[in-house]
Image (tube, rainbow, N blue to C red):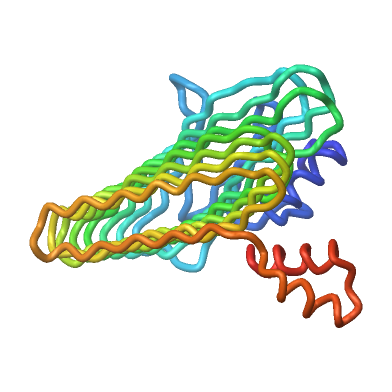
Amino acid sequence: MLNLDPIQMRLLEEIADLHTVPEGAYNIRSNSHAAGRQSSANIEITPKTDKAGIDIRIKPGTKNESVHIPVVLTESGLKEVVYNDFYIGEDADVVIVAGCGIDNCGVQDSEHDGIHRFFVGKNAKVKYVEKHYGSGSGSGKRILNPGTEVYQEEGSVMEMEMVQIKGVDDTERTTTAELAAGAKLLVRERLMTHENQRAISTYVVALNGEGASADVVSRSVARDKSFQKFDAKIVGNAPCSGHTECDSIIMDEGRILAVPGLEANDLDAALVHEAAIGKIAGEQIVKLMTLGLTEAEAEEQIINGFLQ
């Protein structure tokens, strides 16, 4: 069993849907210490010896297995940088569930910076889920700065689900990817900020091989006086296809900046960027209010549906 208190278990539920010890391989980190670790026959997890973090090695051909590596922080003033490297063997098909939850009830800032590198083997398929969540009544900030590097070999597929809906005061998410021939990257970001929160998302994807493709889509809501920036760049270095999209709802005194970036270095690089920022349409609210909802309830229904 994991040696976690009720607050830490609640955070695990929020970021990884865990109610108990997960099946298969896992590494659960709590307040800069390992709270539980287990490898499986096909997935080996070992701690790094030169710095904080772990190496995850997934054998070639591994199918229908998962690995959970969530992090929870409940100590005010705690700041850490963790380095995790994933080596996914050829023809593997796995799910990786990460994420970080911070509960800060103190006056000092708490911060987790997670640096993840993925080396995805030929024809391997990976679904990666990363959820961020913050809670706590203290005045100290909850800060998360994830850095992700993806290196995909020929024919591999990487699907990334990046979610941050509540409680994170400041975040800078940086994601870079390099794709070989026939490799495919799918990113779905869902983000909501409120009060004075700040969220910066930066993506740089290099399509280096023939037939490589990327689809990077962000849906976000900025409430109160929060600020968001979505900066996505796709570089086409071969016959390839790339698409980025930012679809955002702005409310109250929120601010949103969308920065498109397309760089074609090959005649047959087909790259597209789309961006839309706007408020909730009044007729949508009126329609829901005719069904008996208050205006606030109607707004919440629209937002929840938008961020699904």
Residue positioned 21% across, 50% down in the render:
263
Residue 246 placed where, x, y %? 47, 57
Q: Residue furthest front?
A: 282
Residue 14 placed where, x, y %? 74, 51
| Residue 5 as seen in the image, left or right of residue 25 | right
217 to 130, vertically: above or below: below
Asked if one can make out residue 126 in the rendered structure from this viewpoint, the answer is no
26 to 292, vertically: above or below: above
Residue sitting nearer the eye, 17 or 58: 17
| Residue 234 as seen in the image, left or right of residue 103 | left
Residue positioned 61% across, 45% down in the render:
99
Query: Quarter of the image containing the C terminus?
Result: bottom right
Query: Quarter of the image containing the N terminus?
Result: top right
Residue 98 placed where, x, y %? 58, 47
220 to 257, vertically: above or below: below
The number of numbered discs placed on residues in the rendered structure image is 0
| Residue 241 as seen in the image, left or right of residue 214 | left
Residue positioned 19% across, 67% down in the render:
211
Residue sitting nearer the eye, 66 or 234: 234
Q: In the figure, residue 271 lies in which quadrant?
A: bottom left
Residue 205 placed where, x, y %? 30, 49
Asked if one can make out residue 278 in the rendered structure from this viewpoint, the answer is yes
Residue sitting nearer the eye, 277 or 106: 277
